[in-house]
Amino acid sequence: MSNDPGLLLTLILVAAVLAVLLHQRLWPGRRGGPPAEIHETPAQPEAPAPPPPCPAPFSGKAWVVDGDTLRVNRARVRLFGMDAPEIGQRGGYPARSHLIRLAGGRQVRVEPVTIDIHGRTVARVWLGETDLSRRMVRDGYAVATARWDLDYVPDEEAARRERRGLWQADPRNGIRDPAAHRRWQARQRQSGGSGRGPA
């Protein structure tokens, strides 16, 4: 073998590359440990628990929590197909006040659709023949949530066009995205902020 330093360096580099490739072949995704043939199979993630069953339709007096949540017979009920501004968000108190005027202390019929991740019953709520979700959206105090249902989208468009409720001042920005506001609040709480949000 010659004493050529360039040849020696090339041989060392080739050996290093081969060693790395051999290591990756025998131990994929690991930096040491047993060969791939004897890896334990990773634990399979458990399937998420099925949601609790929806309750049967029920009736009772409505007590307003915020612009899209009621308490009926001790059940926390989220109005289906719409989203109102949060308390602390611009429009949150007017939305809550409007829902109080419509249904506060009155007899309602609750037709459950699902249970949400917070354990609330998501439901169509009726005051006589009036769908409260549709009424809140049509009156301009909530937005239609297309991810749930498209039924209320025309009502939101009409409320914007006719500048009803919270759309009076600005038909494009009358109701800021309540879901975005909730995400912002959660980030603020995690970072130690106040979580109140912009007006």
Image (cartoon, grey):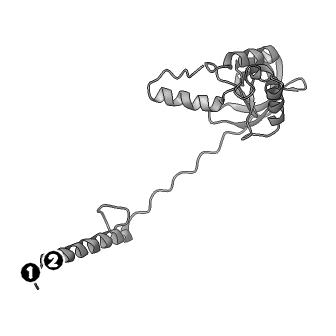
Image quadrant in which you'd find residue 151: top right
Residue 125 seen in the current view: no
What quarter of the picture does the C terminus occupy?
top right
Can you give x and y, in whole percent of width and height, for residue 31 in the image?
30, 61
Query: Helix or strand or loop: what does disc 2 sit on?
Result: helix
Vertical side of 147 occupied by 72: above or below: above
| Farthest right residue in view | 129
Front residue of 85/79: it is: 85
Tell me how far mark 1 sits from mark 2, CA to CA: 8 Å
Q: Earlier in the sequence, mark 1 or mark 2?
A: 1
48 left or right, relative to 81: left
| Residue placed under numbered mark 2 in the picture | 8
Binning the other alpha carbons within 10 Å of mark 1 as few (below 14), some (14 to 19) or many (20 upward) gives few
Given the image, on which type of amino acid does mark 1 rest? Asn
Q: Which residue is drawn at 20% across and 77% down?
A: 11
Quadrant location of the N terminus in the rendered image: bottom left
Q: Which amino acid type is marked by label 2?
A: Leu
In-front residue for pair 63/68:
68
Residue 157 is marked as none
In the rendered image, the residue lying farthest to the bottom is 1
Does the CB distance between marks 1 and 2 fall below 8 Å? yes
Q: Is residue 59 left or right of residue 17?
A: right
Quadrant in which residue 6 is drawn:
bottom left
Percent from the top left, x then y, of residue 56?
Answer: 79, 34
Secondary structure at badge 1 equals loop
Please state the horizontal and vertical placement of residue 80, each as a whole percent of the image.
Answer: 75, 33
What mark, if any, has residue 3 been given in the picture?
Answer: 1
Instruction: Write down the quadrant of residue 112 in the picture.
Output: top right
